[in-house]
Image: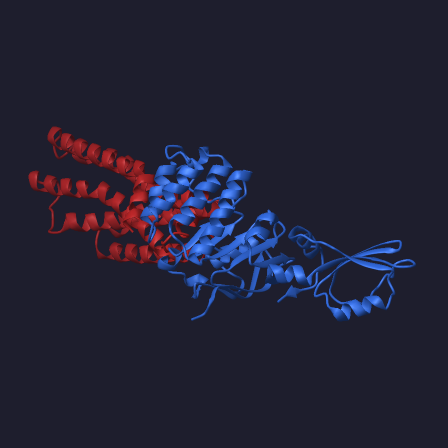
Chain colours: A blue, B red
Amino acid sequence: MDENVIKVENLVKYFDGRCVLDGINLNVPRGCIYGLLGRNGSGKTTIIRILLGLEPPTRGRTFLLEAKSTELSAKLHGRIGYVAEGHNLIQNYKVGRLIKLCKDLSLQWNDEFFNHLIETFRLPADRRVKELSIGMRAQLNLALAMAIDPELLIFDDPTLGLDTVARRQFLELAIELIQQQGRTILFCSHILGDVERIADKIGILAAGKLVVDCPLEELKERVKKLRVIFPEAAPANLHLTEIINQQNQGREMVITVANWNKQKQTALEIFKPSSCTEIPMSLEDMFIECTKPNPEYIES
Amino acid sequence: MFALIKREIQDHIVYFIGAAVFSAVFIIISFSLISRYDHKELPVFSIGLGVPAATIVIFGICAMGATQMYLDRTRKISALLSTLAVSRNQILLARIITGILVILILFVPLTITAGILVRLFSPPIPMFTGMVFEISVTVYLMAFAIYCIGLQTGWNSSALTPSLGALFLTCIFIPLVLIKGFGVHIVVILVLFIAASLIRTWHTFMKTSL
């Protein structure tokens, strides 16, 4: 049995002649929380929509729960919880009616858990979805996705519009879910702190390519930002490979390098720097560096 | 599946009510006309009543198909439904079943009434066996064909050309029946048209982005 719940093979997608995804390969193993990051328009939502069979790919294949995305059966859909970006809920329905519809169309429904979420989020059943605030819509969407006890959860910016407390509640809920039930989560978000808090593995999309695909800890190990001071003006070219970013200012050079190792350190020491200190990087810093034009690949 | 059909009925309840009311009004008017006027005057009233009634029915049924698809597209209903334990086939099937239900609500009482009237009153022209049946089958198929046009138009209604095309096709049906008359030929033409139309709708609905 394949342990990869999500598989993307050489995925290419064009929109009106514009290449949005350019040969993406991605695997998400069972029980993993995968944080998929990228700037606006980098193709995160497109990958998710193709995975769910909502959008046809131009080339390549995608699999969810060992089935081709284009051939996902109703039963398989019933094992996947999805929170869409912008919360694709039927706007003119009352909350109660939408809940009933989703319940009737689900293979299983955890009433106890759902009611707990509804009480926690204080969602009014008698109001129309369009009358709810963005935050409440997000909460409703989350509750509906989680009530079906899904084997795989796909969150496309789920905390968008949530206040700090609700966001924290959601993250704790997600952690609880993954720890207790061993479920897989594909998580897209612009709030990198959230991703850093819960993700095991990170993927970063830039210019249609997956420039980072490795465990979070490994990413932190492999990407280094260094402040190097030289006795004279900093050299323009260090002849190092996989430099993600380099900024020179007089004697000082700040470089971000992927796959930092002994060989690269030796190569740097040829220039006899006066000092070389590591600048701690958060996931946000790494994201900014990796999404700059022409980043090197940091795929595992 | 039942939940999907129920949702379609609830969302388009106005068409069900409209069909029931129209059917009831038409039956009442038919009975009152037949009881008041003799056979010589009846054809004049029948044409006077039938032409506007047929126009309302044709555009009403076409509008229902178009509304179902248009609202789905604009409200992203299928985008939500297809992330639940539902396939696109089921969504479309539920939609078509709902359309058929509206057609049945509209025409079954009228067919029964026509049958009763034929039995109660001697018709102005010699009746042959199965005439009511042939007319009914043609009318049902024609209504369903028009509904199928509506389904296709609703999914493409952002463009003017498909809407005009649908209007043209809808308008063609009446002269087609007038030329071919009721019978096997028109039934075959309508069945072929319905099959082609449903395949096209199914293909578009299955392949399109939701």
Residue A107 on image: x %, y %: 33, 54
How many numbered marks does the figure carry? 0
Residue A230 on image: x %, y %: 88, 59
Q: Which residue is rendered at x = 62% and y = 57% of the image? A: A205
Q: Which residue is rendered at x = 70% and y = 53% of the image? A: A281
Of the 4 image quadrants, the one containing the N terminus of chain A is: bottom left
Examine the rendered structure and indicate whether residue A59 appears above or below residue A91: below
Q: Which sits in the foreground, B179 or A282?
A: A282
Q: Which residue is rendered at x = 47% and y = 39% of the image? A: A137
Q: Which sits in the foreground, A282 or B2?
A: A282
Does residue A120 appear anywhere in the picture? yes
Residue A40 on image: x %, y %: 62, 49
Of the 4 image quadrants, the one containing the C terminus of chain A is: bottom right
Residue A287 on image: x %, y %: 66, 54
Report the side of A143 relative to B98 (left or right): right
Examine the rendered structure and indicate whether residue B97 appears above or below residue B117: below
Does residue A19 appear anywhere in the picture? no
Q: Which residue is rendered at x = 47% and y = 47% of the image? A: A173
Report the side of B64 relative to A48 (left or right): left
Report the side of A63 relative to A11 (left or right): left
The image quadrant of residue A256 is: bottom right
Report the side of A279 relative to B97 (left or right): right
Q: Which sits in the foreground, A248 or B120?
A: A248
Outermost residue, top direction?
B36
